[in-house]
Image (cartoon, helix red, strand yellow):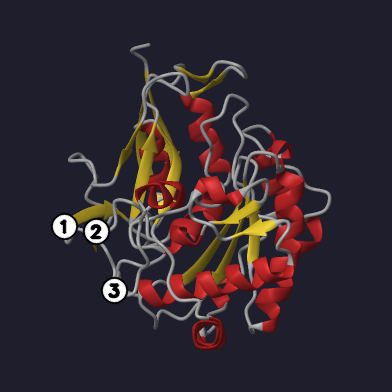
Amino acid sequence: MGETLELTVGERTVRLSNPDKVYFPERGFTKLDVARYYLAVGDGIVRALRDRPTTLERYPDGVTGEWFFQKRAPKNVPDWLPTGRIAFPSGRYADEICPTEPAAVVWAANLGCLTFHPWPVRRDDTEHPDELRIDLDPQPGTDYEDALRAAKELRVVLEELGLRGWPKTSGGRGIHVFVPIAPRWTFVQVRRSAIAVARELERRAPERVTTSWWKEERGAKVFVDYNQTARDRTIASAYSVRPFAHAPVSAPLRWEELDDARPRDFDLATMPVRYADEGDVHADMDEHAFGLESALELAARDEREHGLGDLPYPPEHPKMRGEPKRVQPSRAKAEE
């Protein structure tokens, strides 16, 4: 276990300690397998992470061991790996790594990072997101097939608002859809746009889609997690390895692939083959930057005509102006 390898990654040499340490016992995948995977999809994951402050989800002893999120850049970060300063809702700051090359990803993999959680901003402007991220999260009683149906309906809603989304599997049961946007709006405005999109989707499929923040109100539906657009909330990047026994990865997809693709199709072994054949199917995302004017107008119309204002923020987030009471409905009723 004391062995060390040196991997050549572009112009860098990255040290990999304990390469034979088993990270996925069920499949037998090791730390070296994870590093080789990230080498195989290097340009794709760098496209997803480039210049984005990134939180590391670390499993130094593999998926059966203890794990933690590392938001601040480790003290031993190499001088060639840039960082970006972000502000948390509390007002505190942190410097996070901002990968710009595959070597940065492999370096983080050596620390036991399996999943990369990039902010929806770039390090040169950390106050204005350049992605609207929509998380379709199947609740108990639903599954990936339900998220798939919601995703196809979401595509229509986005197109009607002049937006285009790029879908990917979450690596679990859900689907993520990312929309590249011009970095002109605040976190609050981007979140408001996500709420408007979610409500429109819910209106069209009320029996299958929900925006209810409180789990007791969601039922067996797909939850559109609008709070993934709140400041300091992040979503696993495309190509990230997910910490489940079968070693799945978050797989970028074309819309026309959705019907046939399933989350278990994409893992440490199969994604490098797909990548070699197809390349990064989301490579053109950075060529687009859509506007949120139509989504924000929809939000304003919802409030003006239907009295639908803001929705609750995550529990750790400071109370926001216009936010409704952050009290679980059953508890509020019991206190009446």
Q: Residue furthest top?
A: 1
Element marked by disc 1: loop
Element marked by disc 2: loop
Q: Looking at the image, is 74 positioned above or below residue 53?
A: above
Q: Is residue 70 visible?
A: yes
User: Which residue position is annotated with label 2?
Assistant: 88
Work out whether mark 1 precedes mark 3 in sequence or the reverse, and give the earlier one.
1
Q: Looking at the image, is 257 positioned above or below residue 186?
A: above
Q: Nearer the viewer, residue 124 or 229?
A: 229
Q: Are marks 1 and 2 in contact (CB under 8 Å)?
A: yes
User: Which residue position is annotated with label 3?
Assistant: 321
Q: Are marks 1 and 3 in contact (CB under 8 Å)?
A: no
User: Which residue position is annotated with label 1?
Assistant: 92
287 displayed left or right of 49? right
Q: Looking at the image, is 8 positioned above or below residue 65?
A: below
Q: Nearer the viewer, residue 60 or 101?
A: 60
Q: CA distance from mark 3 to mark 2?
A: 17 Å
Which picture quadrant has residue 254? bottom right
